[in-house]
Image: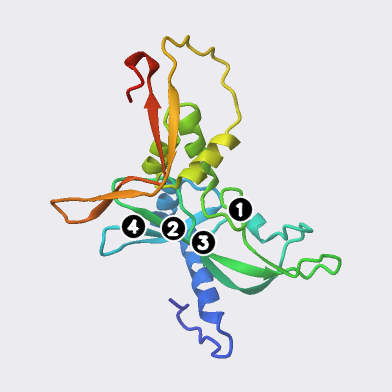
Amino acid sequence: MTHSGTAPDAGCPWTCVIISVLYAERSCRSTGLLSDTTLLLELDGVSVARVERLADGTRRVHLVTADEAARACPTCGVFATRVKGSAVTRPRDLPYGESRLEFRWHKRRWFCREAGCARRSFTEQIAQIPAGARLTARLRSAAGRRVRDAGSTVLQAARDLHLSWPIVMNARIQAREVTDSPLPEAEVLGIDETRRGRPRREQDPTTDKWLLVRDRRHTGFVCPAAGGRR
């Protein structure tokens, strides 16, 4: 996609990409439908440029930066004025609806022209998607709350949110807030067993697809009152 009436410079490989990002940003400000889509997504710092549905039903959401603070140098804090290039990242977010949802964040690289700053360039980042992050902050927080507040196992939370076991386990450790309400008295104590081994797959007789039934870290619950049965 290029801005109509603008001839890209063949000598600059980033020209077409930068024009596409700028065009999408202007469209987000002027098109009410896209503004409504952005409001529905409710991810602070970005706007929805467009949404497309792929052949497998996946909804691909193209995002552009909507926070002016994203062009501030993370080292010195000075706002950049010269664009270096463009980049596209694929942060993962909370599931929404039954079909798969994936992001494409079209963001810019900036030159830091502050004389006393050691950083020469940087890419845009926002609070929900820090530099180098593959998950949105709200997805990581939701994973931790599922284990901490909802009583879900790490494995089940990972399956529900389409994440790996180590990511959810790390999110649980980071969720350190303690609720004020007293915990109920336990009638029977059990033990969580975590199995570490080779993953196991079984073939679905209807679709012939191989499904993961046990991953490298499988968690079960042992009940002493039931003679150690799960």
The tag on residue 64 is 3
Label 4 Cα neighbours within 10 Å, binned few <14 / some 14-19 / many ≥20:
some
Mark toward the start of the polypeptide (4 vs 1): 4
C-alpha distance separating marks 3 and 1: 15 Å
Q: Which numbered mark, 2 or 3, is in the foreground of this view?
A: 2
Label 1 Cα neighbours within 10 Å, binned few <14 / some 14-19 / many ≥20:
some
Q: Quickly name the residue at label 4.
A: 59
The extreme bottom residue here reads 11
Q: Quickly name the residue at label 1.
A: 130
Query: Residue 150 location, x and y as percent?
Result: 43, 27
Q: Secondary structure at mark 3?
A: strand
Q: Nearer the viewer, residue 197 or 13?
A: 197
Q: Is residue 139 visible?
A: no
C-alpha distance separating marks 4 and 3: 16 Å
Question: Amino acid under label 4?
Answer: Arg
Note whether 141 is above or below 108 in the view shown.
Answer: above
Question: What residue is rendered at 54% in x and 14% in y?
Answer: 181
C-alpha distance separating marks 2 and 4: 9 Å
Mark toward the start of the polypeptide (2 vs 3): 3
Question: What residue is rendered at 54% in x and 90% in y?
Answer: 10
Q: Quickly name the residue at label 2.
A: 103
Question: What residue is rendered at 51% in x and 45% in y?
Answer: 167
Question: Amino acid under label 2?
Answer: Phe
Question: Amino acid under label 1?
Answer: Pro
Mark toward the start of the polypeptide (3 vs 1): 3
Query: Residue 214 location, x and y as percent?
Result: 34, 44
Q: Nearer the viewer, residue 221 or 116?
A: 221
Q: Secondary structure at mark 2?
A: strand
The extreme left residue here reads 206
Mark toward the start of the polypeptide (2 vs 4): 4
Label 3 Cα neighbours within 10 Å, binned few <14 / some 14-19 / many ≥20:
many
Query: Residue 146 location, x and y as percent?
Result: 45, 32
